[in-house]
Amino acid sequence: MKWASSICGPDGLNATSDDLSSAIGDCLYSLRTKLAASSVTGGEERARADIITVGEERARADQIDLLIGFVTPHFADLYADIPRMIAEQEPAFKGVFIGCSAAGLIGGGQEIEQQPCIAFTAAHLPNVSIKPFYLSDAMLPASTSSKEEYEQKIGVIDSDNPSFILLPDPFSFRLDEFLHGIDQHFPESVKLGGLASGAHAPGGNALFMNDRAFNSGLVGVALSGNIVVDTVVAQGCKPIGSPHVITRAQRHILFELDAEPAIMVLKRTIDGLSGFDLELAKEAIFLGLVMDESKDDYQAGDFLIRNILGIEQTTGALVIGEVLDKTLTVQFHIRDAATSADDLRFLLKEYKEQHVDNAQSEVRGALLFSCLGRGAQLYGRANHDSDCFRDYLGPLPIGGFFCNGEIGPVGRSTYIHGYTSSFGIFREKESRC
């Protein structure tokens, strides 16, 4: 298994067909040389063209089994041409291609936001089944559909234990309903991804699958076989106060915590803060829902973070951006650049200790689906989350984009997140000797 990532732009990249086609060719050439060099040197960072000594057959386009691409809205008029341009630049490419439009891109060690660029991540995946699929909203299986109906629509079976990369359009697809169904019928499968970004109205985004481009629905790929997809979902918050038990709630409405009015518990929590935490709480406060009630102590990653949308005027109850019917324990949270950075570092350190230091197979590459509200806008500098990932896991290829919502698991269920970085980390199931 080999991964590589590349990004082209913004310097010298204009919104013309010739420039875009040439940039696609440059990116794909970069990916080929990195994949070929990694066969010799063992890592993307050492994949320099001047040290490649393998034969030309090592760098053929058919070495790319999976190609994932993202393009900024500066090229919106050319979205439909992108699959053709890839085929023209790489006529020997016979793998699977998926991708989407994005307001900011991640690849080649960079995060570029709000500027014209394209980014591709490529993988050579021996002994891995790669099944692309497209669903329009009308094709979405009904909530009462059987496992067999879901398997038929997606083209894979649950017993293969596939992992899913999902790229939906935010305007035209009932993603919550789809995630509920796929969690139910593929309970052990990993699902991660991000909602296409860059457009402000329906029909403005692009989704790509092989030789086709869509402006609605969902594209995805199912990976099974000799591959493991681990996830790190960093929601960027820290808890304040103490955990509380929900004693009265109805769907999105939170009436009571610990048999007290929820608004009073919130007020007491805020009154117990001081300094910078108090200032953050005055700006925005969130509710963390515990996903695993069996734990005695809750840490980052144990909560599903949801917005407090407002106060119900007649009762003083809190309106929460999540159905609360099955939740028992919650805790209030705050968020800023420092808490987001601390949360990410904690989760990556924990992942490294649990999965890398003692792993039988090494990490080969990663995808990052990050919120539009993170990046330089949050941290005041570019490349923060990519750099943090490499600080803990080394100079691995990482690609992705800034999303209109991030998809990733918390506990055993999959959710749409905000202000989150959702990482998919790829390694072989069976390590080669």
Image (cartoon, helix red, strand yellow):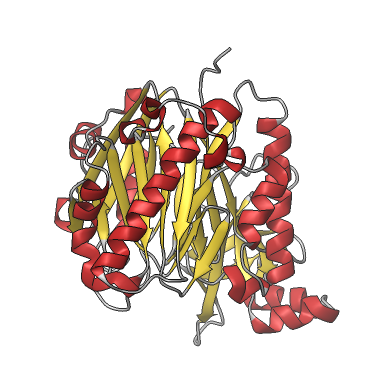
Left or right: 96 with respect to 364? Answer: left
Is 316 or 76 nearer to us in this picture? 76
Q: Position of residue 388 (x, y in %)?
A: 68, 54
Residue at x 55% of width, y 40% of height? 50
Q: Nearer the viewer, residue 324 or 172?
A: 172
Image-based side of 16 in relation to 379, left or right: left
Quadrant of the frame with the C terminus? top right
Report x, y in % for residue 327.
Answer: 54, 54
Looking at the picture, how far across and down is residue 297, in whole percent? 75, 46
- Establish if 321 lies above or below 2: below
Residue name at image x 55 percent, y 44 percent: 397
Asked if residue 312 can be seen in this view, the reply is: yes
What residue is shown at x 55% (from left), y 77% (from top)? 317
Q: Residue at x 61, y 39 (%)?
A: 46
Can see residue 258?
A: no
Question: Quick one: 373 or 383, which is closer to the camera?
Answer: 383
| Quadrant of res 191 | top left
**How many numbered marks have been drawn onto this rendered protein structure?**
0
The outermost residue toward the right is 275
Task: Name, please, the residue furthest toward the top.
Answer: 433
